[in-house]
Amino acid sequence: MADVSTMTLEPSVPGTLVDGLRSFAGDHGGAKAVIEYVGRRGARIVLVGTDGAWGDQFAPSTDVARQACATAGVDIENAWERELIEQMRPSKDLWRSMGRRSLAR
């Protein structure tokens, strides 16, 4: 029988995920995150820097994503609020790449 004192309900958070979140926040004057469930793949953490830059990281689950953000000191928004969306500043390269994409039906 397993020793209950060694069992934990806390999700295992990869150090590289926490490091990536801290690095982004440090490079962009702080950051806020929105966590999106993406099915079997896990969760996408969309980061929006204070300077308007944005990026993302993937976690194996929403629980791991929330724990990683808490460990990295990144605030989590419950949803895409207007103020957060208006803060985002997509780069010219992103606009160019989106313009080249065609939607499949």
Image (spheres, rainbow, N blue to C red):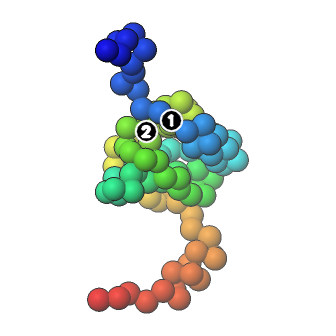
Q: Nearer the viewer, residue 16 or 72?
A: 16
Query: Is residue 53 in view from this perspective?
Result: yes
In the picture, residue 17 is in which quadrant? top right
In terms of secondary structure, where does tag 2 sit?
helix
Residue 16: % across, % down = 62, 42
Residue 32: % across, % down = 50, 44
In terms of secondary structure, where does tag 1 sit?
loop
Give the residue at x 60% y 37%: 15
Give the residue at x 51% y 81%: 98
Precedes in sequence: disc 1 or disc 2: 1
Judge whether 5 appears above or below 79 on screen.
above
Q: Are marks 1 and 2 in contact (CB under 8 Å)?
A: yes
Q: Which residue is mark 2?
A: 64
| Label 1 Cα neighbours within 10 Å, binned few <14 / some 14-19 / many ≥20 | some
Residues at marks 1 and 2, CA–CA distance in whole angstroms: 6 Å
Query: Is residue 83 in view from this perspective?
Result: no
Residue 48: % across, % down = 53, 52
Q: Amino acid at mark 2?
A: Val
Q: Which residue is mark 1?
A: 13
Q: Nearer the viewer, residue 66 or 14?
A: 14
Relative placement, left or right, of 68 versus 61 is right
